[in-house]
Amino acid sequence: MLPELLQGSDAGGFLIIQDSAGCSGRHLLKSFINAALNREEAVHVLGFEISEEELKEELKGSLTQRLHFHDAFTDPLGWTDHPAFTVHQFGLEELTRLVKHTSHAKPAILVIDSLSWILRHVSPPVVCRTLQQLKKGGAVRAIIGLLHADMHQRGAVGSVCHLATSVITVAPRMTGDEALAKITKRSKSGKVVQDEEIFSIKEDLTVIVMSKPSHTGLKLTDPENQETDPTANLTFNLHLSDTEREAKDKLALPFVFSKEKKTALLHSGPGSGRILYEPDVNDDYDQEDPDDDLDV
Amino acid sequence: ISSMATPGNSADKPLAERSPFTTTSFQKKTRSKLISIPGTRPSVQNGQLLVSTGVTSLDYLLGGGLAVGTVLLIEEDQYDSYSHMIVKYFLAEGVVCQHELFMAAAQDDPDDILQELPHPILDDVVIHNPVEQPTLSCKCQDSLDSMKIAWRYQNLPKVQSTLASSSRFGHYYDVSKTMEPDIRQAAKCHRFFLPEHLTQSSPAQCLMLGSYSALLKSLQEVIHREGFDLANAMSKSRNILRIGLHSLGSALWGDDLSFHVNPRHRHALTTFLYGLRALLRSSLSVAVVTISSHLIQDRALMGSITRLCDNAIALESFKGSERETNPLCKDYHGLLHVHQVPHLNCLASYLPDHKDLAFKLKRKQFSIERLHLPPDLSETVSRVSRGELAGAATVASPCGSGTFGNKHLDF
Amino acid sequence: MYTELNSILNVTPDSFTQGEFILVSDRQSDASFLIHHFLSFYLRARCKVCFLGLVQSFSHYSAVSQRLGVSLTQAKEKGQLIFFEGLKESLSILIPQETNPESQAMDFLRDPSVGLRSLYEFVRSSLSSSGGEEKGADRAEEWGPPVLLVDDLSVLLSLGVSVGAVLDFSHYCQATVCSKLQGNMVMLVRCNGLEEEDDGDDESSDRLLKGLTHQCSLSLHVQGLPTGYCRDIHGQVEVCWRRRQGDGTHMQKKLFQFKVHDKGASFFARGTSNAVL
């Protein structure tokens, strides 16, 4: 499923790569940029968290003449005199102007690194509205955004992801160069496809899908977080085998009155005497209410 | 059963060997020459100038004493009885060493607190005790007491003849009696009683600090006027200023930390502590701050407060807690947790040997001891109390420099 | 400077990666010994160092550096080290005097909502003006790439600055120091209490740590031992490389235990402490 998404999405698509402090999704984002450049599409990168040099360094192998970097990294808040792009310029008109400025035949792909930076400074409703307008506006063919999900309120993450057509959540795996991607894709017809894939990214930014994690038991968890079983490695036995359990169940406990025991005690055999007893009022003696005057 | 008593006994020997008192002869000469203030001595660890808290067992726990320029944070026990006592010890030690005092409070008048200082035992009856009793016959706890102050240093001749100016480090006090007024009045005391300062609000105060603004200003004035700041030339004879700040963060200080999970003035106290650290680091003063942490609703705030102080200990009294009825606790009045040890002018800080500590208030003396079980004599209760011990030990162990959780079950 | 840590990070004062943002963090432990390591490391590497000492006085850093074999006073005189002493600067603002303070770097103390722009201005001017001002002098010495060290960021939260403002500050520092000037940056964050799993209601220092973790290229996280207090092992440090390494891996994690000594610290693999073997 991951290769399909990399192959290029349909127009009006909005893809979110969600990551957390434990696993960065930026490498996957770069793979998406790389894939789009290799398809000879124009890519506009709105970079808050990555500098132009660093991005171009990574994309050395690909055709970077169609890559347009909008620098929101050096001065996103306008603290110096001439900011290139500040976070407050994040709006439909400004972005359309930026993308239209370098016109290509096809509408471009807008990459936002990251939506988290914008969400920290612009209120979520405004962000959502702008994203929706961009998606529908036609100036960009598709939007790809990186979102650090653990930095925001759950509501904000949910609202933004609600607008997306596809969400890829990356999670760490045991080894450093592998990661787990949980993909949710909504098609126009309303069909929702979910999938999980383990992938790794090669040096030339191509994505290799290793395998699907089997849900039967191979789901690797961090050994650190595994519950320690206190009954493991004991010097004595706490477990019962089936035969032992059977023998244990058979054993009659001393103070349990089984039916046989009761009859054996009460009917001590034919020919001997029997006790006949009929309960009367005195048997109804209540210790808590000896005078029988309380309304219990 | 007998193994229960051994940890205490085996601890005696290393305790004596590690006791800072036995190694003071190795102190740097330059340091000792620089500082000749009564009631101080350089630390064995890092040459830091130390003063005594007045409680010798607490001094030992803190690595010899309180370093000048640092803050000791005491998280009050629920009824503020024992923490209040430590503050009084701290001030009394200042009186005996002829240090200057600064007491600030919002609840009780500082003068009242100063009137209740414990009575110093200056003609030490204690000195000869270890000599008279051969150490072998001593019970475990008694020998611990005598170890805390190396007796031979108590026998050193006093420099001055006046009673109240002993040059010795750390004194004993009798809490059953109060200090004579004439000794007390010999000490120079500065006081800050918040109700008296509420009316006069200066226009140029820092808004961040709230009601602590006046206190910080008053502290700075005293330090400046009396020549405690290090920047000043050695014009006056050097002395130490002991600062006691009682129940900061309480409602009476105008703080709302006790009422809301997200208090409006949540940064006033931490900002004040930052300013206090700034003042202390540049002056010959040392502070003891108490905070009723059990009243503070925002738990995370206590972490920030602790980090802005240097030493941090917490007192947990058994009074009113279910531990009071626990047979394990009948020998003590509460537990003492060390939350933070100072990292000042050194990389490796002094780490206590163990962190299971308890305190008790004897008839005349407050002391801190290693928590251990009374010998388990009866057969029937043994299993129960051992189980409870395990429970109590896990609660008592978490400590500032790095323990949390008991992840593995150790058999 | 701890040589064992250098070999773990695969650096020496003569060769180290430039443009790195190193995040040092701790939880229920004290990671400030690592700040002293980086301070002495970069001074030995002949870098131009700007040190924001917000939690301790100069004499503290100086005394510890002395033990590690570096003199801060000399470095300051030579112009290699620019030391910002937050405690000293704060007093004139907390206790207003007649004379106005000359430095504006701590302006946030007056009103935390204004953010840390003035503190950033201080960093920028002290690191980028290297060489420019001292032209008149005998051009003293040429220093290597600029380095910014902060001890520590979480105290800013205690002084009322918001998490967002601290993240903005570190972003601007990163853009200037790491990206534009190709220097390095080391920041310390200290977290409160235990890690809580339920997100959404995070404590402010945790939110700061998460935000900075996304920004940094290398993180060192110090924790106490999960099994409890020990005199001989002071805790464990998790080293995590978050940028692509030479061997192509994206994220690499290693865990070490450490012990802090009087004049340094030793690092060892788990379970290989001298006290155990």
Image (spheres, coloured by chain):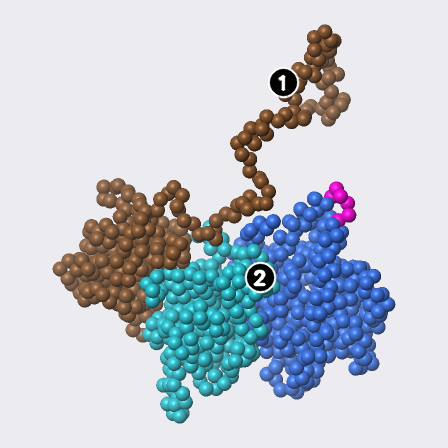
Chain colours: A brown, B blue, C cyan
Q: Is residue B377 magenta?
A: yes
Q: Which residue is mark 1?
A: A259
> Numbered disc 2: what chain?
C
Q: Nearer the viewer, mark 2 or mark 1?
A: 2
Residue B207, given in percent of the width and then of the height, sits at: 52, 68
Find residue A65 and report its horizontal and vertical position in percent: 18, 66
Q: Disc 1 sits on a residue from what chain?
A: A
Q: Is residue B223 visible?
A: no
Which label number is shown at residue C213?
none
Q: Amino acid at mark 2?
A: Val
Q: Quadrant of residue B183?
A: bottom right
Residue A28 relative to residue A238: left or right: left
Q: Secondary structure at mark 2?
A: loop
Q: Which residue is mark 2?
A: C276
Q: Quadrant of residue B399?
A: bottom right
User: Quick one: C268 or B284, which is closer to the camera?
Assistant: C268
Was residue C85 drawn as part of the magenta stretch in this picture?
Answer: no
Region of the chain picked out in magenta, as a range: B376-381
Measuring 72% from the left and 76% from the top, which residue is drawn there?
B39
